[in-house]
Amino acid sequence: MKKEKLIELLCLLEQDGRQTNERLATLLNVTVEEVVEAIAYLEKEQIILRYPALINWDKIQGDEQVTAMIEVKVTPQRDRGFDEIAERIYRFPEVNALYLMSGSYDLSVIIEGKSMREVALFVAQKLSTLDPVISTATHFILKTYKHDGVIYEKGDDDRRMVVSP
């Protein structure tokens, strides 16, 4: 399969990983066998890492879980840059995502916990005690409006102006 079709296939799978191979073949105008081969190739090359479901946890758990985005300023290590400290941080089971950033802070860490106190203890006892960590700033996510391109709660589609007498 050509690169353009592979990218198109990846976009379709990213939108909905549960689409059947038959539907993907129809949408891409290729054979089912080509789709099966392409997906096997993309999985083998670790271009497709897994097929997660996007879940609105607020609807099922309410306030029982908190998500925090932690900005971390670190001292890069000689010959390893940020990779060594990043690896130490992403190995914590509490860490959901870790990004190297440009700007005021070097790393952005996203974690989930059962309470703000649990997140605070993670920062105080695990993250900030690492030698290369200079400072942290924790931001709690209060509500998710959109994630991975998906709007969580769509408002009223009626956008007509209200006319009052």
Image (spheres, rainbow, N blue to C red):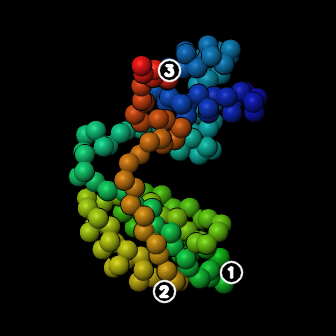
Tell me how far mark 3 sits from mark 1, CA to CA: 60 Å
Q: Residues within 10 Å of mark 1 (few under 14, many from 20)?
A: few
Quadrant of res 154? top left
Q: Quadrant of the N terminus?
A: top right
Which residue sits at x=49%, y=80%? 135
Of callouts 1 and 2, the N-terminal one = 1
Mark 2 and mark 3: Cα distance apart in space? 57 Å
Relative to 3, residue 162 above or below: above
Q: Which mark is residue 160?
A: 3
- Name the element at disc 2: loop
Q: Position of residue 121 (x, y in %)?
A: 30, 74
Residue 63 or residue 24, whichever sits in front: 63
Q: Nearer the viewer, mark 1 or mark 2?
A: 2
Disc nearer the start of the sequence (2/3): 2
Q: CA distance from mark 1 to mark 2?
A: 17 Å
Residue 33, given in percent of the width and then of the height, sits at 62, 19
Observer-nearest of 21 and 152:
152
Foreground disc of the pair 3, 1: 3
Query: Mark 3 Cα within 10 Å, few/some/many (few <14, many 20+)?
Result: few
Relative image position of residue 3 (x, y in whole percent)? 75, 33
Determine the secondary structure under disc 1: loop
Q: Residue furthest bottom?
A: 131
Query: Which residue is found at the position 46% from the left and 20% from the top?
Result: 163
- At label 1, the amino acid type is Asp
The amino acid at mark 3 is Arg
Question: For residue 131, which numbered disc appears in the image?
Answer: 2
